[in-house]
Amino acid sequence: MITEKMYEKMAELAVRRGVNIQKGQPLVLSADVRDAAFVRVCVRKAYEAGAGSVTVNWLDEELTKMDYEYQTVETLSEIPDWVYDRTKYQHDKGAAYLRILSGKPGAMKDADPIKVNAYQQAYYRKVADLQSYTMNNIGQWSLFGLPSKEWAKVVFPDLSEEEAYEKLGDAIFAVTRVSEDNDPLQEWEEHDAQLMRHADIMNGHQFKALHFTSELGTDLTVELVKDHIWVGGGCTTPDGVYFDPNLPTEEIFCMPLKTGTNGIVYASRPLSYQGKVIEDFWIRFENGKAVDFDAKKEKDALKALIEFDEGSSYLGEVALVPYDSPISQSGILFFNTLYDENAACHLALGRPYPENLKGGTEMSDEELEAHGANASMEHEDFMFGTKEMSIDGIREDGTVVPVFRNGNFVF
Ligand code: ZN
Ligand code: ZN
């Protein structure tokens, strides 16, 4: 059962740890209208924490659906200047961005994909030069989730709406480390320190490659780019403000060398892609490229992902998540990347994160490619970590160092 006190703790965690709002700083909070009661709590907590102003950006799935139903491609593609100007103004004021996720997974799956695509392309083109503010962590930003009945029914289709909602709520609060009698801020500090400790150890080793094996049949070697950086826990803005962009986060992640993955990987959890759930699949890689694959369910969706563009058949991320992490232990498929990618060791097909390469955030696309980074419009995580997963780090000279045994870090 989620109590009022727990909601207050969640709000406090989001503003003080998530975006770590600073004295006098503007906050932009994006939330669905269904969460109005919580939003008021969150806004109050933000002011109490020192926010100079709070602007709420109200969203509504039903209205968005109507936009796609009734508007034309032309009207959807026309993004007014004030959309750009508003965001530019907020960036210039040094705003922090907080986003609450409670949407129904696949809510837009019946919308005309041509219209959705037209709007998204037009929107991203319009605000393209504003993206680096959050992409490069110039200002703080953070995402966290709240249960909704619509979301809960997708996760637990066999339960009543009431039961499903309670169960999803319990799971979200538990994995976000918010309970009736704990101090979430303290727990998050310890948790982040642990993630950064693991990242530091991995960075110290500078392994040439990682070798993964699992009881499902995974036998995969993933070469890493030279001068790679394992990243985990929170981020720091250029002004030195520490924040946690994802609540929760359980991973440390790194950049594979585009042409350096060989062997076979068996997924350990279903992958929800474009409204389809791909199940029991494997992918075989040769010199970085996915050359063969199969799935018991929705093989066509897997094919669409791998063939999305040239780079989507190569890896852009390798991430380590212990089997004993809370999301893994919950055993729940949330149908939301914020949670699902933190459930197990995962790989992503497609685009890498420049921050995983020394100097990467200052490099052009060409420079990144020259360092062995993949490039793609796609970035899709899939889980392959298991209870028995073993990982060995392989040094430049061929010596082998154990990293994971029985699904967890050895250090
Ligand atoms: Zn990841
Ligand atoms: Zn990812």
Image: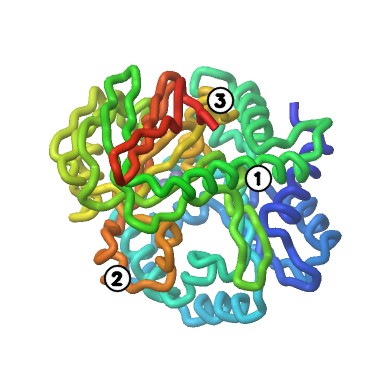
Which quadrant: the N terminus? top right
From the image, tell me which residue sits under label 2: 367
CB at mark 2 closer than 8 A to ligand 2?
no
Residue 231, given in percent of the width and then of the height, sits at: 50, 51
Q: Which residue shows up at 46% across the image and 20% down it?
A: 406
| Cβ atoms at labels 3 and 1 below 8 Å apart | no
Identified by mark 3, the residue type is Asp
From the image, tell me which residue sits under label 3: 324
Residue sitting nearer the eye, 286 or 203? 203
Identified by mark 2, the residue type is Glu
Classify 10 Å Cα crowding around label 3: few (below 14), some (14-19), many (20 and above).
some
As drawn, the label of residue 193 is: 1
Q: Which residue shows up at 22% across the image and 44% down it?
A: 306
110 shown above or below 114: above
Q: CA distance from mark 2 to mark 1?
A: 32 Å
Identified by mark 1, the residue type is Ala
